[in-house]
Image (cartoon, rainbow, N blue to C red):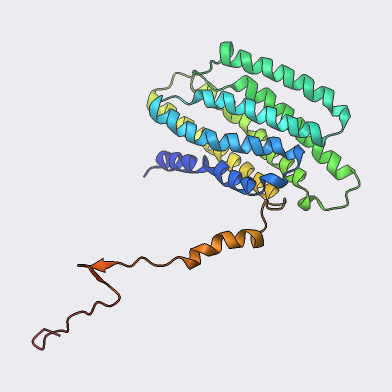
């Protein structure tokens, strides 16, 4: 297997990272604060997009529209979360930025790049730039304020860290992918370059999902292990199936004794 094929397999494996994060969030969904519910919805939609992406690749041979939809989900959900985490003086900037983003996303899908033609470079750049600014402001807000608990025990710190990790590189990846598809390369070269440029973005997306999974594990489980234990104990009370051979139960079946002339 050559390097390009290995990277493609790695990218397909890393795309499943939202499934793990969604599993961590699902078992804690009843105890998630209101500020983090948009993050839960974002991870759930990303997990749904994983299956939709596989279906689109196999059936339509086109998954570009998922890049446009993924950016809208990312920005709208995380802006809603930062709106609840940051002080009120940031709310006008968040509302204005969201309105501008929606206009840019609509123009990007309809005119600039096309919903099924090219990746959404403009909306991704604007949305990630807003999220990066909010994440930096939020980290400064956490570090400058009088905190009673260390940062590593605060879920909102891991949220901003995940945003900084992913959004800082996805802008470059989207722009680079858009450039190579307009550079006039042949199909084989385009596939190799696309795989190569998508690898860092997929890796950092998986790191982002890992940080969000760590963030979710800081919340209590929806059902405590002791309360869930009785529902699982019935597995140990299952009775084994009584298999039969020629109408006779295997437990009482006696095998024939070997003949004295059989080879040892």
Residue at the limit of the structure toward the bottom, as seen here: 260
The one of 118 and 44 positioned closer to us in this rendering: 44
Residue 210 visible in this rendered orientation of the protein: no
Q: Position of residue 85 (x, y in %)?
A: 81, 36
Query: Who's the residue at 83% across and 26% down the image?
Result: 91
Q: How many marks?
A: 0
Horizontal side of residue 58 vs 236, given as left or right: left
Q: Is residue 223 left or right of residue 48?
A: right
Relative depth, front residue between 43 and 230: 230
Within the image, what quadrant is residue 238 found in?
A: bottom left
Name the image quarter holding the C terminus: bottom left
View extreme (right): residue: 146
Q: Quadrant of residue 62?
A: top left
Q: Which residue in the rendered view is the most extreme toward the top?
A: 111
Residue 183: x percent and y percent? Answer: 48, 19
* Depth check, front residue: 44 or 103: 44
Residue found at the very far left of the displayed protein:
261
Q: Is residue 107 above or below residue 152?
A: above
Identity of the residue drawn at 33% across and 67% down: 242
Give residue 29's position: percent from left, percent from top: 67, 44
Q: Position of residue 262 (x, y in %)?
A: 10, 84
Quadrant where the N terminus lies? top left
- Please give left or right for residue 226 compared with residue 34 in the image: left
Q: Residue at x 49, y 63 (%)?
A: 235
Is residue 151 in sight in this rendering? yes
């Amino acid at each position: 297997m050559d390097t390009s094929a290995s990277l493609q397999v790695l990218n397909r494996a890393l795309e499943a990272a939202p499934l793990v994060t969604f599993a961590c969030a699902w078992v804690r969904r009843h105890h998630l604060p209101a500020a983090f519910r948009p993050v839960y919805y974002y991870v759930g939609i990303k997990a749904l997009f994983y299956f939709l992406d596989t279906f689109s690749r196999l059936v339509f041979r086109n998954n570009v529209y998922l890049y446009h939809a993924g950016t809208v989900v990312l920005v709208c959900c995380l802006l809603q979360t930062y709106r609840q985490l940051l002080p009120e003086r940031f709310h006008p900037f968040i509302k204005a930025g969201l309105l501008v983003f929606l206009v840019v996303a609509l123009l990007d899908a309809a005119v600039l790049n096309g919903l099924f033609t090219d990746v959404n470079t403009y909306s991704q750049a604007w949305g990630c730039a807003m999220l990066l600014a909010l994440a930096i402001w939020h980290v400064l807000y956490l570090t400058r304020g009088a905190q009673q608990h260390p940062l590593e025990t605060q879920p909102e710190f891991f949220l901003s860290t995940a945003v900084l990790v992913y959004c800082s590189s996805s802008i470059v990846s989207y722009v680079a992918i858009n450039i190579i598809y307009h550079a006039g390369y042949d199909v084989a070269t385009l596939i190799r370059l696309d795989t190569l440029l998508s690898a860092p973005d997929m890796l950092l997306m998986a790191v982002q999902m890992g940080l969000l999974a760590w963030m979710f594990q800081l919340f209590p489980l929806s059902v405590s292990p002791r309360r869930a234990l009785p529902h699982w104990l019935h597995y140990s009370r299952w009775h084994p199936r009584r298999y039969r051979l020629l109408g006779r139960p295997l437990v009482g079946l006696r095998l024939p004794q070997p003949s004295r002339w059989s080879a040892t």
